[in-house]
Image (cartoon, rainbow, N blue to C red):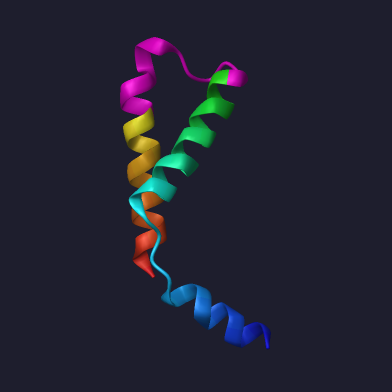
Amino acid sequence: MTEKNADTHADRSVSDETLLKVAKEIVIKFIEVGRLTPATFEQTFDNIYKTIKETVRKG
């Protein structure tokens, strides 16, 4: 039964909105722990978003 559920989830595509939400949560955590500053926000967010998108859409 677990195998069947895994196949069902693999068939779903992840929306761009979901990718943005995940990237946002990661960026928020980075800000909270002091790993991200306003000066590096744009580049960091872009890198995080692209990495998540490439990882999710590979398989």
Identify the image quadrant of the C terminus: bottom left
Camera-side residue: 33 or 11?
11
User: Where, by quadrant of the figure, is residue 4 drawn?
Assistant: bottom right
Q: Main secondary structure of the magenta part?
A: helix
Q: Is residue 22 magenta?
A: no
Image point (49%, 43%), residue name: 22
Would you place residue 40 above or below residue 5 in this image? above
* Up-down relation of residue 45 to residue 40 (above or below): below
Tell me if residue 4 comes above or below residue 30 in the rendering: below
User: Where is 8 relative to 49, above or below?
Assistant: below
Task: Please provide the residue range marked out in magenta.
Answer: 32-44
Report the residue at 52% width, 35% height from top.
26
x, y percent for residue 54: 34, 54
> Would you say residue 42 sits in the magenta stretch?
yes
For the N terminus, which image quadrant?
bottom right
* Residue 35 screen position, x and y as percent: 53, 20
Could you tell me how many numbered marks the image carries?
0
Give the percent coordinates (x, y) of residue 33.
62, 20
* Horizontal relation, residue 1 to residue 31: left or right: right
* Residue that appears at 57% across and 78% down: 6
Residue 38, position as x, y percentages in the image: 40, 12
- Taking the spot 35% from the left edge, 62% from the top edge, the residue there is 57
